[in-house]
Structure formats: C-alpha cells, structure tokens
Image (spheres, rainbow, N blue to C red):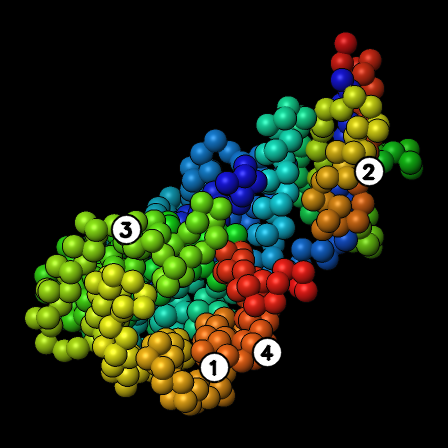
C-alpha cells in the first residue's frame, strides 16, 4: 500500500458568515467520512491549518527575511490535508470522489508520498 | 441505524448538551455577569471541535475535549481582560461573592435559567436567551420554535444581551428568594419548550431527541425537588411530560417511520409512566390557579385513557382546546383544536378556526397547519385540496421522519409513481 496526501483548498470566504446549523451539517459530513475511513483502516491522519496566512522565510536577497504569508490576496486557501492509504492513484482518486469536500468545495489535490522514504 | 447516522446523532447530542453545560458551569464559577463570556467561550470551543475533528476524528471522550478547550479559553480570556483592567497577574477565577444571598437551586443549568428570566427583559427575550444559552439550541431552532425569523431572533438576542450587560452590576447577583418565585413560571415554559423540541425535532434525521426529553424531565424533577413550594402548574406540566414520554415506544416503526397517535399500537405505551402521570395530574388539582399545562395534561390524559383513536372522547378534547385557546392562544393550539373538531364532524367550525389564523406571521412555515388542512380536505372528500395541503407541508422545515410521514400520506393519495 502507498500513502497519499489529499490537500483540501477552499475559497477564502467559504466559511465566513455561514449560519451555525449549516456549518454543523457540513462538518458532520466531513467527520462522518473520516470516521468511516478510519474504521476501514484507510485514514492515516491529517492536520487542519490555521487560517492566518502563515509565514514565508526567504533568503532571496542574501539575508534571511521573514514575511507574512501572501494569502491575503489569493482567492483560495489551503484548509488542511489528510493522509490516506491506497493501492495506487486510481484508488486514491476513487476515495477522493467519495470525499465530502467534493460536495461542499471544488478541488482536492492528490500527491503520493515517496515510498522510499518509509523504508 | 447506520454508522454515519449514529455519528451525526452523537455530534448533535454532544454539541447541544455541552453548550448548555459549559455555559452554565462557567457562569456558576465566574459569576452571573459573565454570561456573555461563557457563551463566547463555549461557542468557540464548539466551532474548534467542528473544524478540527474532521482531520483528527472524534476524540475518545468528546465531552472532556470540549470542556478542556473551553476551560482553557476561559482562563485565557479572563487573564487578558484582567490585564486590560489593570488587575494583578495573580488574579484568579473567583466564585460569586459570598455575601450575595443566593437561593441557588444547586444545579448550574437551573441557576442560569433563573438568571435568564430577568424581569427587566421582555418575556419573549427571556425565552430566547434561555433557549439559546442554557438549552444549547441554535438560532434556527429557537426561531422556528417561536415563529421568529432568524433576523428577528438575533435582534432579540442582541437586545437581551445588551440589557444584561448594561445592568451587569445588578445582574451580577442571583435573585433573592422572593424574586425567584416570580421567575419560576417562565422556567416551566422553558422546560416545556425544550421537551416539545425533543419530542418532535424540526430538523435533522433523528426521529426524536430523547436527550432533550430526558433532560427536560430531569430539570423538571430537579426544580420540583428544590423549590419548597410548588409553582402553580408544575405538577400539571410534569404530568404532561410523562404522558407524552410514555408514548415514545409506539411512536416509530422499526424502520424509523413516524407513527402518529392515530395509528399507534397503544399496548406499547409505558403503563408505569402513565400511572405516574395520573398521580401528578391528581396533585395538580390542588393548584390555586389553572394554567395551560392543566388543559394540556388533561388532553393528554384523555388520549391515555382512550382504547383507540376513534373511541377517544373528542368532545372533551375539543372543550379542553377551547379553554386552552382562551387561556394561551397560539397557532399550534388552534390547529389541534381544529383537528378535534374534524374528528367530531364539525368541519365548518374547524375550517373557520384555521381561517382565523391564516394571517399569523410565518404560519405558512408551520407543518401542522398544512396537515390540519389535509385532514379537513380528506374529511370532505376533496382529494385535490388534500394533496395541495400535503405539498405545502412538504415544503416546510421538517425533520427526516416527519418528511417521510408526509411523503407516505402523499403516496397513499396519489400513488408513489406520480411524485
């Protein structure tokens, strides 16, 4: 089996001013899916990212400089990522199809981790 | 129940229960002036749970998780505001001042309910505040209950909180024993609404929120045990809750479909609980004044006695609804009164009653109103009007089992193919 990272971007204002009942229904879908995948042994873990834009550390100018994340201008932000277990990209795509993110948002980016790193 | 449905129910129950518990226990520790802070902190913790659990899964003990997160946030907030206020760093969480005469009911939730029933607030504002603060209802749920739009509700809530804040000096104390007495009738009303919501939730897939029904009964019992004199109507209310709860085992089919009173297998009713209910009803007779709960538990007792739906004493029920309507008119009461008249064959009178309330704000969103029209049309043999009424009922905010029930009625009327 191989490990795949599912990155879950969403529109920057997706959850702003969402009525609580709606937010709750949405999250229930996500939590239900993760619980189900965990029960099947397919869910390996994940992290929710804070929506604060983060930091960028760069040495482009020769000195190390720290900037606030460039996310204030962008339309989409990365909400978080999940790691799943799948045989190949085909299976990973199948799993992504069933993800509630596809119902409530637009995009899932899938990347396989390099299995060599696990040995 | 599927795993997914079980998870949804667990989340619904946990969130609602914990919201009330967190707010009540924080207020009990930090003092009544901190209602706003307690509410914010509880809300933040719930939002945090809902947005991180999708990644981490539900923790082994969701309640402990929520309590820890909310507790830390509260400490954090107090420190911050303490600094702003120039208070020393070692400023600690304090219990309400010792010198305040608190007739505390020794149950944080009951205490907070008492606090929300501040007479400076309009009665409906008190209700909104208590339902939203103590019982953990969302704005949508509270609004649907009180026939308020969500906007109107949030305005009321904001106004109530502003008033509480402005009066926080006086409000920072529990009412004296004398003042407490005035607030108790409203507590009964809150318990009543809480139970009603659990008995037939307006949204979601759960056919019944047993947690809400149980808690309403628990609060009612607690209040009865802790108040030296019985509040007028309390025994009657308690009887009502028990009569209704006794029917629970018969209210749903094995597949979760709602079975209305008319079609329930009455052998499944909890006879012991009905016995307790009659005992409460007996105690209610000594009340110095009649309350709406007397009429409502009277109605419930007639149903409890009736061997079948047809053989029910509809004349008495209709009479009780008439009294209830004179005492505490509401669209729901009128609708039920009309149904009892339909059962008696007094169709024109039922029609006139329903027409009387057709201008009530938000009446179109009330499922029962449309279902009464359905019954009326059916009694008159008017299939088209019956179908139209059901279609209107379908468009209301219904929980899944109620929606199923309406679909079933429609299928019976039109055949499943045409839908």
Give the residue drawn at x 54%, y 60%.
B408
State whether residue B297 appears in this view. no
Secondary element under disc 2, as helix, strand or loop, is strand
Secondary element under disc 1, as helix, strand or loop, is loop
Depth check: B360 or B417 in front? Answer: B417
Separation (CA) of disc 1 from disc 2: 60 Å
Write down the residue under mark 4. B384
Write down the residue under mark 1. B380
Separation (CA) of disc 4 from disc 2: 52 Å
Q: Kindly indicate whether the residues beneath marks 1 and 2 are on one polypeptide chain.
A: no
Give the residue drawn at x 76%, y 37%.
A96
Separation (CA) of disc 1 from disc 4: 11 Å
Dot 2: chain letter: A
Q: Position of residue B373 (x, y in %)?
A: 48, 78
Q: Which mark is residue A109?
A: 2
As drawn, is B266 to the left or to the right of B226? right
Dot 3: chain letter: B
Depth check: B255 or A18 in front? Answer: B255
Q: Kindly indicate whether the residues beneath marks 3 and 1 are on one polypeptide chain.
A: yes
Tell me if label 4 and label 3 are in contact, CB under 8 Å: no
Depth check: B419 or B25 in front? Answer: B419
């Amino acid at each position: 089996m191989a490990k795949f990272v599912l990155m879950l971007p969403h529109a920057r204002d997706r959850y702003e001013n969402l009525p609580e009942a709606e937010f709750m229904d949405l999250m229930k879908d996500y939590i239900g899916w993760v619980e189900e995948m965990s029960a099947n042994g397919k869910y390996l873990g994940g992290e929710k990212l804070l929506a604060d834009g983060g930091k960028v550390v760069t040495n482009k100018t020769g000195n190390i400089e720290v900037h606030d994340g460039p996310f204030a201008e962008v339309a989409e932000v990365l909400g978080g990522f999940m790691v799943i277990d799948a045989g190949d990209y085909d299976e990973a795509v199948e799993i992504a199809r069933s993800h509630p993110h596809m119902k409530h948002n637009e995009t899932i980016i899938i990347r396989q981790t390099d299995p060599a790193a696990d040995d | 129940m599927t795993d997914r449905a079980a998870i949804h129910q667990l989340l619904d129950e946990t969130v609602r229960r914990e919201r009330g518990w967190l707010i009540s226990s924080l207020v009990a520790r930090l003092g009544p002036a901190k209602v706003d802070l307690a509410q914010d902190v509880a809300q933040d913790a719930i939002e945090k749970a809902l947005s991180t659990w999708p990644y981490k899964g539900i923790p082994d003990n969701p309640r402990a998780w929520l309590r820890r997160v909310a507790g830390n946030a509260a400490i954090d907030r107090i420190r911050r505001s303490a600094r702003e206020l120039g208070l020393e760093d070692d400023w600690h969480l304090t219990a309400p001042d010792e010198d305040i005469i608190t007739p505390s009911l020794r149950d944080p939730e009951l205490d907070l309910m008492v606090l929300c029933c501040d007479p400076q607030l309009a009665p409906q504002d008190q209700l909104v505040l208590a339902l939203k603060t103590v019982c953990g209802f969302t704005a949508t749920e509270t609004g649907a209950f009180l026939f308020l739009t969500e906007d109107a509700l949030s305005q009321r809530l904001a106004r109530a909180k502003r008033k509480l804040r402005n009066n926080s000096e006086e409000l920072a104390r529990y009412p004296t024993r004398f003042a407490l007495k005035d607030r108790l009738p409203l507590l009964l009303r809150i318990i009543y609404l809480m139970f009603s919501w659990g008995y037939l939730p307006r949204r979601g897939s759960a056919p019944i929120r047993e947690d809400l029904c149980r808690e309403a009964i628990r609060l009612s019992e607690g209040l009865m045990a802790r108040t030296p004199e019985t509040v007028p109507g309390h025994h009657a209310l308690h009887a009502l809750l028990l009569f209704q709860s006794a029917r629970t085992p018969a209210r749903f089919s094995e597949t979760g479909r709602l079975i209305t009173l008319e079609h329930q297998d009455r052998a499944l009713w909890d006879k012991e609980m009905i016995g307790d209910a009659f005992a409460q009803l007996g105690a209610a007779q000594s009340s110095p004044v009649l309350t709406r709960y007397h009429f409502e538990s009277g109605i419930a007792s007639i149903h409890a006695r009736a061997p079948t739906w047809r053989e029910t004493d509809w004349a008495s029920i209709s009479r009780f609804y008439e009294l209830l309507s004179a005492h505490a008119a509401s669209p729901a009461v009128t609708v039920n009164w009309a149904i009892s008249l339909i059962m008696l064959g007094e169709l024109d009178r039922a029609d006139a009653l329903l027409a009387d309330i057709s201008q009530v704000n938000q009446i179109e969103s009330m499922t029962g109103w449309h279902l009464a029209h359905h019954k009326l049309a059916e009694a008159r043999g008017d299939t088209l009007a019956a179908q139209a009424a059901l279609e209107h009922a379908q468009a209301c905010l219904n929980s899944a089992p109620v929606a199923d029930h309406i679909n079933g009625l429609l299928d019976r009327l039109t055949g499943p193919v045409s839908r």
